Amino acid sequence: MSRRSGVLEFAVLGLLHDAPMHGYELRKRLNVLLGSFRAFSYGTLYPCLKSLVAQGFLVEDNPDVEYVPATALNGKRSKIVYRLSPEGKERFEELLADSGPEAWEDEHFGVRFAFFGQTDRAVRMRVLEGRRSRLEERLERMRSSIARTRERFDDYTLELQRHGLESVEREVRWLNELIETERATRTARASDPPGHDQPGRSGTEH
């Protein structure tokens, strides 16, 4: 499975974990979740859905209705509603618990972060620290590259390199803040008396 298809599978399972929906609505939600620069066409989404159905991860609630893509002329939308099967829920939980190197990469991290509210705190911490480590390695390479090539490039090329460097530095600072918040929250929870419920806290905790 390619990285791109793996990201799409995770996002589809995650969105359908919240509620069943038809393909048109799912595509809109994916575009909001992943951003317009990663907009998915029906030609990309529907093979993924069919694959997940074939693997038993999704169920089609109206499988006998033929899908007709929405166009400006016909205005039709799929009537098939997709929902997670029990196996699909297990698959999503399995993907959600993965904190390995793939979760730190550019293609995966944003989508993983979008579902952090459903992710175990220890897994969140491992993903954040892994992402920070990966970016710190990238920073070291970028700084070395700029130092080596400074005299060979014009001012505009150097500015472009500095811009890329500053972008990575900003993300590292952001990750540092998130990691400190996670640690502070964990410390606060650990200091709570047994059975103590703090008002105003919501969300799924694992």
Image: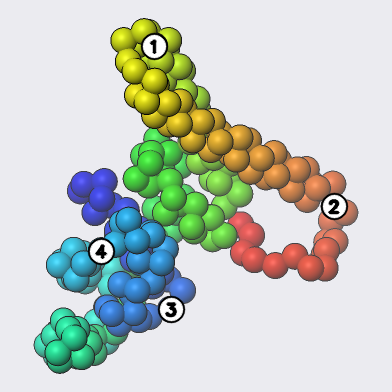
Badge 2: residue crowd in 10 Å (few <14, some 14–19, many ≥20): few
Task: Residue type at mark 2: give it.
Answer: Asp
Frontmost of labels 3 and 4 is 4
Q: Quadrant of the C terminus?
A: bottom right
The residue tagged 4 is: 40
Residue 62 appears in the picture as rendered: no
Mark 1 or mark 2, which has the lower sequence index?
A: 1
Relative to 138, residue 58 above or below: below
Frontmost of labels 2 and 4 is 4
Distance of mark 2 from mark 3, alpha carbons?
34 Å
Q: Determine whether the residue tagged by mark 3 lies in a helix, strand or loop.
A: loop
The residue tagged 2 is: 192
Q: Quadrant of residue 35?
A: bottom left
Contact between labelled residues 4 and 3, with CB atoms less than 8 Å apart: no
The residue tagged 3 is: 19
Frontmost of labels 1 and 3 is 1
Frontmost of labels 1 and 2 is 1
Front one among 187 and 172: 172
Distance of mark 3 from mark 4, alpha carbons?
20 Å
